[in-house]
Image: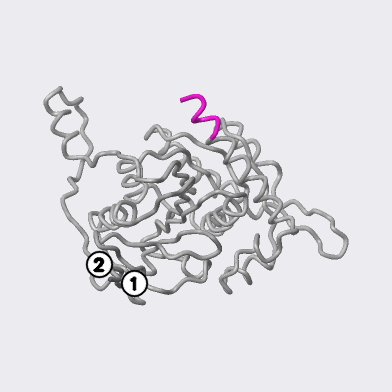
Amino acid sequence: MNLLKPVAFYTLTRGFASTRPCHVKPDSRQAELMARSLPKRLPLKGVRDIVVVSSGKGGVGKTTTAVNLAVTLAGMGKNVGLLDGDIFGPSVPLMMNLSEVPLVDEHNCMIPPVNYGVKCLSMGLLVETGPVVWRGPLVMSAIQRLLKGAVWGPLDILVVDTPPGTGDVHLSLSQHVPISGVLLVSSPQIAALEVTRKGAEMYRTLKVPLIGLVENMSHVICDKCDNRIELAQNSTKAFASQLGVDVLDSIPIEKEVMQCGDSGTPLCLKYPESNFAKAYRNIGQKVIDFLDNKRTDT
C-alpha cells in the first residue's frame, strides 16, 4: 500500500517563548527556567553536517551561492540537501526547477523532492502564490517544521540558504540544530561588507564557526580579450583580515548567472568549464576540508 500522499495541510506548532533584553544577570533558578523554554539543539537524523549560507545583507547572491554550492558538492560525490530558509521570499524552487508539492510518509514527515542530485525543501513548495505575512513565532515554527519535519537523511551535507538580516530564522536555526559552519557571502562594496560583519558577529555570539567568505560579483572578465576588470580596491581582503576569516574565492559577474537562475539550471551544471564553475569547485573543496578538519579536531 502506498503511504505517500501530498501535503494537504501544513501544520505549524506554537509554543516558542519570547525573550526580551535583561540588564541584570539572571540567577541560577532564572537561568534554569529560561533554558527550559528554549528548543533543544539536537542533530538532524541522518545528516552529518549543516552548512549555513549567510550574509546579513540582501542582494549579494546568497541563494545563487547556496544553489551552486549544493550542486557542486553533489557533483563531488557528496549526498547533499538544500533547505530554503527564506520564508518570505523563497527562490530555491525557481533556481532548482522544482514545483511539485512534497509527499509525506506514514509519520507525516515531508519527503524533499530531488533535482540535480540534491534534496530540496522550501516554503515556496508548500504555500500558494502570494505573500507570507507571519509574525516571528510562526516563522520559527516553519523553520522547525522544515528542519525536523522532513526526511533529510542520509546526507553528508545540508546546505541552508538564509534571508537577509540577523533575526528569527538565524536564531531558530542555531537553537534547533548544531551548525557545522557558516559560509559568508558578500559583494565587495563597503556597505555590503559592513552588514556582513554584523551577520558574522551574530554567529560568533551564537558560537557557530565561520568557514570563510565568498566574494561575489567582485570582477568582470571581458569575453573578447579575457581582461579582468576589478570592481573594488581590495576592500574584501582587508575586511576578511579584520574579521579573521579567509576569502575562499572571488566570483565574477557573468550574464549567464541570471539566465541560468531564471531557467532553473544552475550555472555550474550548464557551463562546467566556466570561471564561475571552477570557483565553486574550489569553494566546495574548501568547505569539505573545513568540515573534515572540524571532525578531526573534535
Residue 239, by quadrant, is: top right
Give the main secondary structure, helix, strand or loop, of the magenta stretch: helix
- Please name the amino acid that badge 1 sits on: Pro
- Which label sits in the foreground, 1 or 2? 2
Kindly identify which numbered label has been placed on residue 29.
Answer: none
Contact, mark 1 vs mark 2 (Cβ under 8 Å): no
Q: Which residue is mark 2?
A: 10
Q: Nearer the viewer, residue 143 or 226?
A: 143
Q: Is residue 83 above or below residue 166?
A: below
Image quarter in which the N terminus is found = bottom left
- Percent across and percent down for residue 218 are 68, 52
Indicate which disc residue 131 carries.
Answer: 1
* 256 vs 271, nearest the viewer: 271
Q: Position of residue 83 (x, y in %)?
A: 42, 56
Which portion, as a residue range, is magenta?
A: 292-298
Q: Residue furthest bottom?
A: 129
Q: Using the numbered discs, state the Cα–Cα distance from disc 1 to disc 2 in whole angstroms.
A: 16 Å
Q: Nearer the viewer, residue 127 or 116?
A: 116
Q: Nearer the viewer, residue 145 or 133?
A: 145
Q: Residues within 10 Å of mark 1 (few under 14, many from 20)?
A: few
Image coords of residue 145 (percent x, y): 28, 56
> Badge 2: few (under 14), some or many (20 or more) residues near its Cα, within 10 Å?
few
Q: Which secondary structure, mark 1?
A: loop
